[in-house]
Image (cartoon, helix red, strand yellow):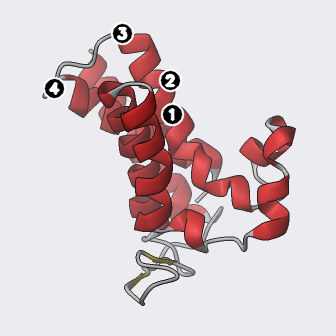
């Protein structure tokens, strides 16, 4: 999926979560969810996050796209660091965004392996990244967000 679709799905995820749990500072919470929604793509040199956060560029050299950073292990490791070292709430926010990224990438033809590199639990769907169906999904997500806002 493209960054804008990840951001829309992450935003919707944050909107739902903020009504279910205490989130502390809502702006930081949403920011971390949205950051998490883009973070798995630091393993792709053409991703927005890899281009903007050039200090993370080495990840593109040492990892393959949709490898360990697109797995439950990567999700738990990175969000766990924030959870235990900074804040449980902010670690959970990063987890939500990161996991939302994995879920929606699981709808694509390429899919993801949730348990990479330990085992295979491949999830793939029928959406071609950047094609018409992804645009339909994006429009649907935006409409749901707007309905929830107003």
Q: Secondary structure at mark 1?
A: helix
Cα–Cα span, label 3 and label 4: 12 Å
**Quarter-wise, where is residue 68 in the image?**
bottom right
Cα–Cα span, label 1 and label 2: 5 Å
How many other residues sit within 10 Å of disc 4, few (<14), some (14-19) or many (≥20)? few
**Quarter-wise, where is residue 143 in the image?**
top left
Instruction: Tell me the residue at 32%/38% (across/down).
Output: 13
**Foreground residue, 122 or 132?**
122
Instruction: Tell me the residue at 43%/38% (across/down).
Output: 94
Task: From the image, tell me which residue sits under label 2.
Answer: 31
Q: Are marks 3 and 4 in contact (CB under 8 Å)?
A: no
Circle on res. 25 = 3
Left or right: where 40 falls relative to 48:
left
Cα–Cα span, label 2 and label 4: 16 Å
Q: Are marks 1 and 4 in contact (CB under 8 Å)?
A: no
Task: From the image, tell me which residue sits under label 4.
Answer: 21
Cα–Cα span, label 1 and label 4: 17 Å
Cα–Cα span, label 1 and label 3: 14 Å
């Amino acid at each position: 999926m493209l960054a804008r679709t990840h951001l829309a799905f992450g935003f919707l995820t944050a909107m739902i979560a903020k009504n279910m749990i205490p989130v502390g500072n809502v702006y930081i919470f949403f920011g971390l969810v949205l950051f998490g929604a883009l973070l798995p793509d630091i393993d792709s040199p053409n991703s927005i996050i890899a281009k903007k956060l050039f200090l993370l560029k080495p990840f593109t050299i040492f990892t393959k796209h949709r490898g360990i950073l697109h797995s439950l292990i990567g999700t738990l490791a990175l969000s766990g660091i924030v959870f235990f070292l900074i804040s449980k709430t902010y670690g959970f926010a990063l987890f939500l965004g990161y996991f939302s990224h994995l879920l929606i990438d699981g709808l694509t033809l390429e899919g993801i392996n949730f348990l990479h590199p330990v085992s295979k639990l491949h999830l793939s769907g029928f959406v071609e990244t950047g094609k018409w169906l992804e645009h339909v999904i994006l429009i649907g997500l935006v409409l749901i967000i707007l309905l929830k806002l107003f």
